Image (cartoon, rainbow, N blue to C red):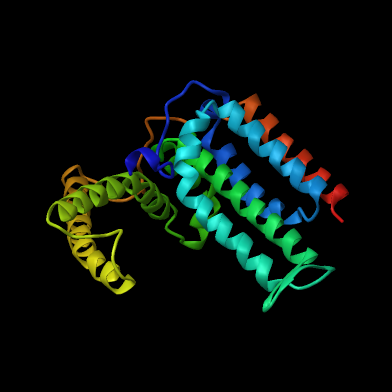
Amino acid sequence: MMEKMIFGRYVPIPSVIHKMDPRSKLIIIFLFVAIIFLANNWITYALIALYTFFMLGLSKVPFRFLYGGLKPVIWLVLFTFLLQLFFTKGGNLVFDWGPIEIYEEGIRMGLFISLRFFFLILITSLLTLTTTPIEITDGLETLLTPLKKLRFPVHEMALMMSISLRFIPTLMQETDKIMKAQIARGVEFASGPIKERIKAVIPLLIPLFVSSFKRAEELAIAMEARGYRGGEGRTKYRQLSWRMIDTLQVGLLVILTILLIIFRS
């Protein structure tokens, strides 16, 4: 399970994306999530695909690693495609067999929404694959600094997100251990009726929740023992540095936005 998990994992590879400032990567992620909804035809989606695979190439993350991690998501993308295929009406009727009717608009919307979902997963996964949780925390805290004037707990919010990202692989590893232990005791997770499979999940969830609360308590005690009292007055060992590559990458995304607006139908 851990070998197939990519979200929340950091892959230490010397690449251009790894050397970028976390603030620029966060800005790129937020902007990408917004502009991808501008794509509504084949030209705009081709531009999105070109940009996505260009960024993946710069990151130097092995394709096999990405493919193995995206296998569980592919089924969700396929389900999204089928949902649009069978329930979206419009255009010429392509296939008609009893209650099943497939229209041109259903095929188009199914492909577009599935691609949109797929590209979003790739780009957002790229953030955690090329950025450590500490860097994400520092970058997010810096970007949200203006909200401190509104008494928003910026440091605490960034810290919670960092801890959540950090413990995703840990919880997956813990789930894998508990699942193997339950299988050794005769629990069947992949066979039998649906009702029995649902019952089999209970021996998995209870130890997982107990373990999660125990880890959270141990982390809180460790932070308190080290004198953690929030972000007020704290200094940083690592200083963020915005460089030319960050400006170029943000500029590239701005160019992509302009092209999407131009070619949008």
Name the image quarter holding residue 205: bottom left
Name the image quarter holding residue 137: top left
> 265 and 79: which one is in front?
79
Please provide percent x and percent y for residue 103.
77, 68
Please provide percent x and percent y for residue 134.
39, 38
Name the residue furthest top: 14
Name the residue furthest front: 97
**Which residue sits at x=31%, y=70%?**
193
Name the image quarter holding residue 102: bottom right
Report if residue 140 is visible in the image.
Answer: yes
Please provide percent x and percent y for residue 53.
64, 35
Location of the C terminus (image quadrant): bottom right
Report if residue 240 is visible in the image.
Answer: no
**Which residue sits at x=84%, y=53%?**
264
Please provide percent x and percent y for residue 50.
71, 36
> 204 and 142: which one is in front?
204
* Count of marks overlaid on the render: 0
In this picture, residue 189 sits left or right of residue 105: left
Location of the N terminus (image quadrant): top left
